[in-house]
Image (tube, grey):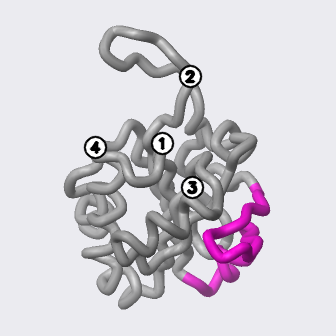
Amino acid sequence: MIEKGDKAPDFALVDADGKTWTLAELCGGAEKPGFILYFYPRDDTPGCTVEACSFRDSYARFAQKGIRVVGISPDSPADHAKFRKKYSLPFILLSDPERKTLEAYGAWGEKVLYGLKRMGVIRSTFVIGGDGIVTKVFPKVTPAGHAELILDGL
């Protein structure tokens, strides 16, 4: 997994509206505060919905600090669009169906669910500065209250 102080791996991924976003575009440059990049397993599932709604409910506080929120999952842009509309999510959701970005950040790997081992998304969050350097890492996230935890640490 990427650690604090590492250069964030670059990516070019499509959002719910078909727009391609890159790391450099989201960072905005050294004079900018950067962004929150969170990885989640699947749109419209219980834990992912709790986490997304936590970011939605705290979105104004992130925006006041000039910080964008960006979610990434393997879901399609169409699934992201439905999820965003259903829960009024005001932030960017990126699609990584080939899991290349998930793997680059260490957010794809072996998980144990109900005693069964399988490969999947490791729910994790990274705070990335305007210069593209990772300033905080939240591995193995608990969805409820996660956004507030990040805000408290900014």
Query: Crowding near pointer 3: few (<14 within 10 Å), some, many (20+)?
Result: many
Which amino acid is tagged 2?
Met
Mark 1 residue crowding within 10 angstroms, few (<14) / some (14–19) / many (20+): some
- Whole-number angstrom distance, CA of label 1 to CA of label 3: 8 Å
* Amino acid on which disc 4 is placed: Thr
- Residue 121 in percent (x, y) is at 52, 36
Say what secondary structure mark 1 lies in: loop
Contact flag, marks 2 and 4 (Cβ < 8 Å): no
As drawn, the label of residue 72 is 3
Q: Which structural element holds mark 3? A: strand
Residue at 25 percent across and 59 percent down: it is 149
Give whichever of discs 2 and 1 has the lower sequence position.
1
Residue on which the image places disc 2: 119
Q: CA distance from mark 4 to mark 3?
A: 16 Å
Q: Find out whether the residues at labels 2 and 1 contact each other: C-beta distance under 8 Å.
A: no
Mark seen at residue 142 = 4
Give the secondary structure at mark 2. Answer: strand
Q: Is residue 40 magenta?
A: no
